[in-house]
Image (cartoon, rainbow, N blue to C red):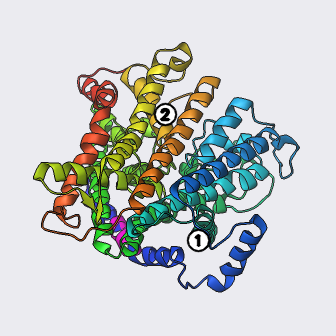
Amino acid sequence: MNLNGILQIILYFFVILLLIKPIGLYMTRVFNKEKTFFDPILCPIEKLVYKLSGVNSKEEQNWLEYAKSLILFNLIGVVVLYSILRFQNILPFNPTKSDSISPDLAFNIAASFTSNTNWQSYVPEGTISYFTEMLGLTVQNFLSAATGIAMAIAFIRALAREQSNTIGNFWIDLVRSTLWVLLPLSFIFSMIFVFEGIPQNLKPYVHARTIEGKIQILPQGPIASRESIKAIGTNGGGILNANSAHPYENPSPLTNFLQLIAIFLIGAALTNTFGRMVKDERQGWVLFTAMGILFLFGVFASYYFESLGNPLLKDFAKINMEGKEVRFGILGSVLYAIVTTAASCGAVNSMHSSFLPISGMMPLINIMLGEIIIGGVGVGLSGMFLFAIIAVFIAGLMVGRTPEYLGKKIETKEIKMSVLAVLILPLCVHCFSAFACTTPWGVRGPLNMGPHGFSEIIYAFSSASGNNGSAFAGLNANSFFYNLTTGLAMLIGRFLIIVPTLAIAGSLVRKKLVPPSSGTLPTTGLTFVFYLILVIITVGGLVYFPALSLGPIVEHFLMISGKVF
């Protein structure tokens, strides 16, 4: 670690803090249907969308109707994207003559991009056509992100309203998330990225002759536009295989910094939107404080261990640049790794498999906590609500106070649904990882032996189940076994958690607001932040300790003793 790196971390966090309030205020106005700068342009488009789709803009839904609409819409998205992938060889805008995608890989990609995971077990520039990129993958980048935002807004309404049966309308939330939030931000970042040199075209790939006289193929395509929504929507899947380590996707330290800002922007600002919509901004700052503490712990821990270097390489112990771009260095790589896993984005500018055991464990822990440290857009805040409910209940029992959250009594149903939603992720990760480790199809995947190979497997299923999409980059995942299992893990990790979460929202919205009393546990101070972090670590983290002990932790001690695989 050095002062320069520490100052870069502080600068990044400071910029995020500066952007939270203006973006949070803007999204509050959008979802409260108050006047915004873009209304003259977007309101007519919104009305046209409702007219063409038959949506009644004045009608609201209860939680079950909201959940049905959300799941049905995304199921249709899986089918449509699967069809595009299977028939891309006969569709237009295919300058590389990409063939149709095999059934198992097409299922994996469709599940991946619809669930906001964007896991890629293939080489995009040699597999996907421009048509599929634009009308298949990029469209789902927007829609999956809008789905997450809509879910968070529905939960916020449940906390803000009193004795109501409805939590909003999924179709309206989806449209407004897309038109007012994702599209304007994507346009702004796309223009900056083009200015910085990221390609944006539909040209065929360039065949360039190198100074050695060999032919090098340079990919082209609509890279800048995909790059912006990849970061803003916490999608993560790149148009190129090397992702943000490729100079076409991430050409400079400035674009690297802007991508980091974009990844956290909406997720962080939604905490302020939450505070404003429940008419108490302190509630939003409490959740962001808990997120920020966990984030800073992860980035400093990873930076510290990665800066120590590999003790087995005595002459180069302080320079662990394996798997990293010299443009970004150790700090730029570590910060990107922590941000992308804290936000459930999955974009990478370095190979996480090349990190030292403990520094590589921190991105894995971020995913395992359930994408709640900022998390995927909207979904991270929803996950934090679940832990907040559990924290209120446990803390209330410990100190003998009434378990209430924002004036809503927390009762048996809310706790059962919260625990169910929280435990779905570790159950999915452990079951699929155990299956992979005990079958010949699964053990053929890792490229490394010993604990690092185990880490590659459990990282893959954590990434899939947590809808992150990043990989240790040491697993041969493009096989029938991994395409099927990771695809199922993505759908389970996304949609099985949504149902109990919306069920909690449906229960809370019907409750009467109870005025605070001397027996009410305060949820706006540092004490509650402490309770919340403790619950996250205990309930969401310790369940993974045995698996981490078999992977990166034991690998760390073996590395110190000189043992390699």
In the rendered image, is residue 239 in sight? no
Residues at marks 1 and 2 touching, judged by CB atoms closer than 8 Å = no
In the rendered image, is residue 24 in sight? yes
The amino acid type found where label 1 is placed reads Ile
Residue closest to the eye, 262 or 327: 262
Give the Cα separation between the discs numbered 1 and 2: 33 Å
Please give the name of the residue rendered at 30% of the width and 53% of the height, measured from the top-left corner.
Answer: 389
Pointer 2 residue: 460
Q: Give the image quarter of residue 514.
A: bottom left
Please give the name of the residue rendered at 42% of the width and 71% of the height, measured from the top-left corner.
Answer: 273
> On residue 192, which mark appears?
1
Residue 81 screen position, x and y as percent: 72, 46
The amino acid type found where label 2 is placed reads Ala
Residue closest to the eye, 455 or 86: 86
Please give the name of the residue rendered at 69% of the width and 42% of the height, measured from the top-left corner.
Answer: 212
**In this picture, is 338 found above or below 513?**
above
Q: Give the image quarter of residue 188.
A: bottom right
Q: Which residues are magenta?
A: 12-19
> Dominant secondary structure of the magenta stretch?
helix
Please report whichever mark, 1 or 2, sits nearer to the chain's N-terminal start: 1
Indicate whether residue 553 is drawn in magenta.
no
Dot 1: few (<14), some (14–19), or many (≥20) neighbours within 10 Å?
Answer: some
Residue 201 screen position, x and y as percent: 75, 61
Residue 235 screen position, x and y as percent: 55, 52
